[in-house]
Image (tube, rainbow, N blue to C red):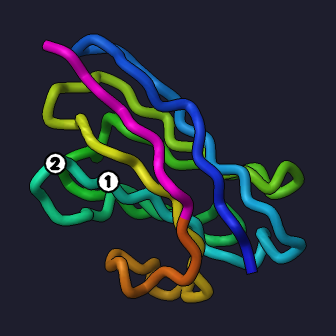
């Protein structure tokens, strides 16, 4: 199993960038799909991006495609979410999650087995 811990959130102006990190404990990190989700106030948690265990396949929500990049460094047991050209609509708590499923890359909350506590991202206009 993996236990994700997110970091890197904060306050940024519209148009700015942030990089979120997800450090996962556990010796099997490199066998898990890693995903990022976000939840804005009053809204349901939504899928943002996912990456397979080898880092060779990725998937993105349409709302972030072309602006966000998911990556991973298995030797460091860490996944990343590079976010660029941020808008106030990106304001949310961002959570990292690990999934055993890899084909297809899961896009639902139920598709993930282990979750971090989340990190707040606030984009000011």
Labels 2 & 1 near each other (Cβ < 8 A): no
* Quarter location, residue 33: bottom right
Label 2: few (<14), some (14–19) or many (≥20) C-alpha neighbours in 10 Å: few
- Left or right: 23 in relation to 109: right
Q: Which mark is residue 41?
A: 2
Residue at image point 76% right, 50% down: 73
Identify the residue at image location x=58%, y=76%.
114
Q: Residue 53: x and y, percent?
A: 68, 71
In this picture, residue 1 sits left or right of residue 48: right
Residue at x-position 80% and y-position 56% = 77
Per the image, label 1 sits on a secondary structure element best described as strand
- At mark 2, the secondary structure is loop
Q: Quadrant of the N terminus?
A: bottom right
The stretch drawn in magenta includes residue 119: yes
In the depicted view, which residue is nearer to us: 109 or 55? 109
The image shows residue 79 at horizontal and vertical percentages of: 65, 51
Vertical order, 26 against 83 (above or below) = below
Residue density around tag 1, few if under 14, some if 14–19, many if 20 or more, within 10 Å: many
Q: Nearer the viewer, mark 2 or mark 1?
A: 2
**x%, y% of residue 56?**
62, 63
124 relative to 105, above or below: above
Labelled disc at residue 10? none
Position above or below: 57 against 8? below
- What residue range appears in magenta? 116-125
Picture mark count = 2
Q: Main secondary structure of the magenta part?
A: strand
Q: Specify whether residue 107 is painted magenta.
A: no
Residue 38: mark in rendering? 1
Which quadrant is home to the C terminus? top left
Which of these two is toward me, 12 or 59? Answer: 12
C-alpha gap between disc 2 and disc 1 = 10 Å
């Amino acid at each position: 199993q993996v236990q994700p811990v997110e970091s890197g959130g904060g306050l940024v102006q519209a148009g700015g960038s942030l990089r979120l990190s997800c450090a996962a404990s556990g010796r099997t990190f490199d066998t898990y799909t890693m995903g990022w989700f976000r939840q804005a106030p009053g809204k349901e948690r939504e899928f943002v991006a996912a990456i397979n265990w080898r880092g060779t396949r990725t998937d993105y929500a349409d709302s972030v495609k072309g602006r966000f990049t998911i990556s991973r460094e298995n030797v460091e047991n860490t996944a990343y979410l590079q976010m660029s050209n941020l808008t106030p609509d990106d304001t949310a708590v961002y959570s990292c999650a690990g999934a055993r499923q890899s084909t297809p890359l899961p896009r639902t909350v139920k598709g993930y087995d282990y979750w971090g506590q989340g990190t707040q991202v606030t984009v000011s206009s």
